[in-house]
Amino acid sequence: MVRVALFVTCLVDGLFPDVGKATVRLLERLGHEVVVPPAQTCCGQMHINTGYPGQALPVIRNHVEAFEGADVIVAPSGSCAGSVRHQHADVARAHGDAKLAEAAADTAKRTYELSEFLVDVLGVTDVGAYFPHRVTYHPTCHSLRVLKVADRPLRLLRAVEGIDLVELPAAETCCGFGGTFALKNSDTSTAMLGDKMSAVLSTKAGVLTAGDSSCLMHIGGGLSRLRSGVRPLHLAQILEHTR
Amino acid sequence: MSARDEVLARVRRAKGPREVAPVPREYRAAGTRGPGDLELFAERLRDYRARVRVVAVDEVADAVAAALRDRGARHVVTASGVPPEWTATWAAAGTVPPSAPPSAPPSAEQAGSGEPVELSDPVSRIESRVPLGGDAREALREIVAAADAVVTACHVAVAETGTIVLDHDAADQGPRALTLVPDYHLVVVRAEQVVAGVPDAVAALDGVRTQTWISGPSATSDIELERVEGVHGPRTLEVVIVR
Amino acid sequence: MTTFLGMPAGGGNLTGEPFPKAAREALGNAQLRRNLAKATGTIRAKRANVVGELPDWAQLRAAGAAIKDEVLANLDEHLVRFEEALTSRGTHVHWARDAGEANRIVADLVRATGTREVIKVKSMATVEIGLNEALAGIGVHAVETDLAELIVQLGKDKSSHILVPAIHRNRSEIRDVFRREMPGVDPDLTDDPRALAEAARRHLRHKFMTVDVAISGANFGVAETGSLVVVESEGNGRMCLTLPRTLISVVGIEKLVPRWQDLEVFLQLLPRSSTGERMNPYTSVWTGPTEGQTSHVVLVDNGRTATLADPDGRAALRCIRCSACLNSCPVYERTGGHAYGSTYPGPIGAVLSPQLTGVDRNPTLPFASSLCGVCYDVCPVAIDIPAMLVHLRGRVASAKGTTPESTAMRALAWAMADARRWRRLVRLGRFGRLASRHVPLPGWSTARDLPQPPKETFRDWWESSR
């Protein structure tokens, strides 16, 4: 049994609590203990990526302290896990805080995105899920290219009983979210979203899944506006589902 | 301060520490892959839609003659160091048969009279080592502009990329304009000149010599990234490989 | 000017409209979107094929990055060696602090030959400094001989791509430009790419045989030997480098490699990344004046030392202008190159242009990316463009000082640095959930619905259920 410290992420906490609940239930069903360190807030990625790394410093410090002592930290987000693993220590170092950089590097080593944790640490691909729907999977950019989760999410999905998993055309193309990019360059973001939605609709899937609630919020927001009927569901929500 | 001194001063102020890690050269280095594979070389040349004839040593003159006949060449230039026997068969024939080449692209400069043509001096030889200043440049331009085919040797060839390298300081490869202006370039490559990869070719060349690396005929992809052969350089590249 | 260490910024064709505004205009052009999607899709597939063929691509990439870093770490020494090697073989070496100085040097050299016309090999450096315009100012016409550059020049258009400047034009648009602008062209010219290429061949043949001054750039300069290397496809480069009596090469100071041997790496990385070929049709290598030519090399700074001064930005100078990042970028594919406003568009342009000019003159480019990371994956010299974009966003924000955005960010960070404060803020957000559905978020709500805030946060659920 692994004692998992859940890094729920600010977006899931405030806007998509069902994703957090699904992650907890999935991990508990697999026989592991889940704790939610109460001091956690956010990884600070938005500040870093928008040009305010100095402001992110206390947020990073808070994150590192919140997860001090946790053996394994799991986030249902490729982007947030990516920031912890690939940005925190660098930001601390660039601002002259060597001690925080060292601590952040240590936190990074213990941090996993959900599919990585399931496949690499727990060694499971069949989590005993049942989901009798037509599903297409969008590999989010940060899970794909920052964390390099490769086909781990797909291996998990293929093992789901009853699932009709269909390939998403041009799956690896960005959906156009990009955090504040969606606001600062909303026209370009919308154009990218349009192409992504066309791809999703071409699959005739009823459910779009991904490992990041942020991208799902973006694509799902577009699909909702189109009244397409396609449901965005986080990977955890499918894997949690049983007969 | 002169521009030179100022730019150098800026560089010294701007750059980081001089110490750098040694360059990791873990790629397939020169001399590690054995001799070049002739079949691969021929295949790669054909991929560029270059024409290839593979012949034995004693068949070179016949192959050159056949190639020039098929091309319908009337005025051939060669580099001064090209062995006279390569073009001997063709020159001895003294005529160009009227047969149109079966697959040659139409060419503005190409003969098309339909009648056999008597050639008093069918092969012009261009000295490569003379300095081509002043009138010599003009003379060269005139000769090559009048030629409809050029025959040269090469210095080295790369199997993996289908590349032929001319060393323009070598007598059998000639000055650069020689192989550029005529619309048809026939290169004779000896088996031992074919190396496996690019590093082997770089190692076989002296960086201070004037070179042209040729991989197939002139081409462009500037219109919708669709490849079109034949823009400014020779539109037809033909290679006789001496096995 | 906001450059590192107060290093002088570059000038020339490196700035334009704010990216979001220019992008909006480009996105409205459906033909452009189709042209770009087709062209970049084709080249992406070709590149992936030929890169996949090499079992040692990762090792070549690592070597390419390391060689360029080695050059940058000792750039002064390599430049001096390069100059010595060139001078000892009879090439005249000139140095230019910026675009204006480079243009004056070239203009003086051209004027001294008495020619009214020069032929040009495709060269990004000369587009960057605005050389054609400068030459026009002294009554000299610069004839672009690369097919795509010719299309751009005849169409009185601007380059939108590093490798294929006319990538935004399709075949019928190109035919129309040729019919309208090319003297003596067949009025029945078709839009078959072969026919268009043939028309260009005929148009330029006479220029090649008669114009006696050529201007080139260089893909590489070898410090050890003084070799200059031009990598091309059409043969226009060979024509320009070979036939004219005077050759002037305009070279950015970062173009050097230390040793002849280093080309064994770059001549594998560049063609496969660039045109998706195993090797480009022609690579010319020359060292000093050959075959009776007079040769000049103009070494240009124009903001490169300002780029070199930033430890987190200098890797942009590794760039070998292959354009793989443009072809792979989902933003570039949709907006095209003109939206970037600079000679260097796409992801590399978004990190290079602001560094060359100072971020204050290009404050929107570092934000012209969703940080999807594909540019880093395909970069043959492993420039971590996403990380560099993030770094430059920081420089932009610092340069702007206090803004409404920075104030809001600061407040948010203050809340996020403490769980109690943060939870209060999240709960507050929830109370506003009914209102928030009806308050449009600028930029977001035009095309997307906002998620409905949940009844309880995850943390509330967790605490109430345990």
Image: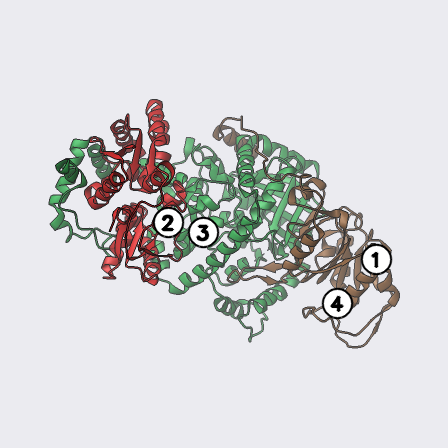
Chain colours: A red, B brown, C green
Do marks 1 and 2 both belong to one polypeptide chain? Answer: no
Report the chain holding disc 1. Answer: B
* Residue A200 or residue A34, whichever sits in front: A34
Q: Is residue C433 above or below residue B78?
A: above
Res. B158 in view: yes
Q: Quadrant of residue A76?
A: top left
Which residue bears the numbered disc 2?
A154
Do marks 2 and 4 both belong to one polypeptide chain? Answer: no
Secondary structure beneath disc 3? helix
Residue C328's mark?
3
Which residue bears the numbered disc 4?
B71
Q: Is residue A94 above or below residue B55?
A: above
Report the chain holding disc 4. Answer: B
What residue is drawn where x is 63% and y is 45%? C229
Residue C199's mark?
none
Camera-nearest label, 2 or 4? 2
Res. C399 in view: no
Q: CA distance from mark 1 to mark 2?
A: 62 Å
Camera-nearest label, 1 or 2? 2
Report the chain holding disc 3. Answer: C
Q: CA distance from mark 2 to mark 4?
A: 57 Å
Do marks 3 and 2 both belong to one polypeptide chain? Answer: no
Do marks 1 and 3 both belong to one polypeptide chain? Answer: no
Secondary structure beneath disc 2? helix
Q: Residue C3: image x %, image y %?
A: 41, 35
Q: Is residue C142 above or below residue A36?
A: below
Do marks 3 and 4 both belong to one polypeptide chain? Answer: no
Residues marked 1 and 3 touching at CB (< 8 Å): no
Which residue bears the numbered disc 1?
B86
Q: Residue C410: image x %, image y %?
A: 23, 35
